[in-house]
Amino acid sequence: MRSIPRFAGLDNGWKQPLAVLFAGLMVSACGEQGRQQRGIEGSAGFAGQAATAAGAGGAGGAGGAGGAGGGGGTPALADASTPVAGAGGGAGGSAAVDASAPDASAPRDAGANDAAADAGPDAAPGSDASTDGDGCNAAVLDPTSPPSSLATTGDLGTHDPALIERDGVFHLWQTGRGLPAKTSTDLLRWQGAGAAFPNGNPGWISSQVPGATDLWAPDVSYFGGRFHLYYSASTFGSNRSCIGHATRDAIDSGSWSDQGPVVCSVTSDDFNAIDPNVIVDEEGTPWLSFGSFWDGIRMVRLDDGGDRADDEIHALASRGGGAIEAPFIVRRCGYYYLFVSFDRCCNGASSTYNQRVGRSQNVLGPYVDAEGRALMQSGGTLLVTGEGRWHGPGHNAVIFSGDRAYNVFHAYDGDNGGRSILRVAELAWNADGWPVSGGP
């Protein structure tokens, strides 16, 4: 178990707390190498979030009115003063960031013009995207047209994105004060959409995790007839952490009803209860994976209501106390694919985050990479790493929409002071059954 604090610049990838000066206020920015550094007060869209939280969407959540939509923790915040022209940024300030750099192209559709940045993903307006592409015909790689990054615009300041689609609208939540939200109808143009908890953290957090401020690394899912939002509460350099749980009946209206903590860790544990992700297995059972550093990635079984079903904790992946975190599991063509992030985030253009993947025919593993190395023994096939202006791409989410899949993550923009920016890339599976991602 690793119990020493993590500080930016050290070989073990630990981060130092950050302080962000905005609108004349000093805002505490907590953090950690994987949400132990995510406790930042918003990022690119924090202008609206900090200044107009009360009017940022009432009950909060994606799809609400208002333009809070702040981004997650990052050492340097994108300038929120000027929305991108034509990007549809939310009122209250959206990120003045245009990610349509030469390396970013429009989504590819049959017969689509790659220069048409407003041509959205090939999904029916009423279709539901999910993390289940269990059929083998979903997101098949065309070797003549490899996956590329999408030309995103609007409110792009983001850390640790998680998203779901309903009725043609993508709803995204992220690290930050109250868990800021964004929406998009095409995965290209993003606008702020309030926050899950606009009136402050759920009351149990102050006693269970003293000192926790911003909430980190959310996950959104639908099972048991309700929408579920899981999130992390922690403090810098500590595994005294909890994963909280909130529910609501509609994805785009009503307040999130907090259900309290689902799993917690204390300093004597060899795991860290942050970075949640839900996967529903082929029998309909929901499972919650989580973990950051310490001895790696863990999983617990949930009941149909989203609470913990038993006392068992299963180990999925480990680097022996090294930098691994942010699990995300999808099911496709008879396999479960476990995506994780290796190495160091939250250090701007010096971040070394990279995405890895392994697979198993059982949700509990064992997971192995393309070379047969066990993820429990530091294995993991490289999926995305930094390139060009984009550094430290990590904490990814995967979403299926129609017959396509997308890899959604944050990366640090070397052309904009190392700010943490939302990235969306096409994702497809090759003939050997391994995912290939555009990016970074």
Image (cartoon, grey):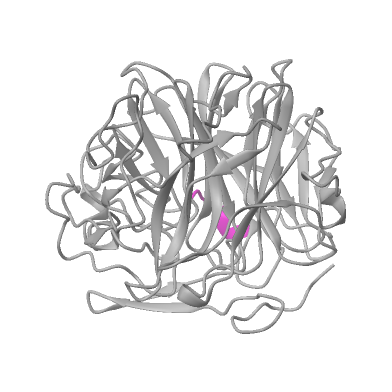
- Quarter of the image holding residue 206? bottom right
Q: Residue furthest bottom?
A: 9
Q: Is 335 on the left or on the right of 364, as rendered?
A: left
Q: Residue at x 13, y 47 (%)?
A: 86
The quadrant in which residue 28 appears is bottom left
The span picked out in magenta is: 202-207
Above or below 186: residue 200: below
77, above or below 254, in the image: below
Q: Nearer the viewer, residue 50 or 104?
A: 104
The residue positioned 72% from the left and 31% from the top of the image is 336
> Number of marks in the image?
0
The picture places residue 25, in percent across and down from the top left corner, at 29, 77
Q: Residue at x 85, y 67 (%)?
A: 1
Residue 365, percent from left and from top: 83, 36
- Residue furthest to the left in view is 85
Furthest-front residue in view?
Answer: 144
Residue 69: percent from left, percent from top: 30, 51
- Residue 204 visible, this angle: no
Q: Is residue 225 above or below residue 329?
A: above
At x 40%, y 41%, the residue is 172
- Residue 337 in view of the camera: yes
Task: Give the camera-side residue of 323 and 308.
Answer: 323
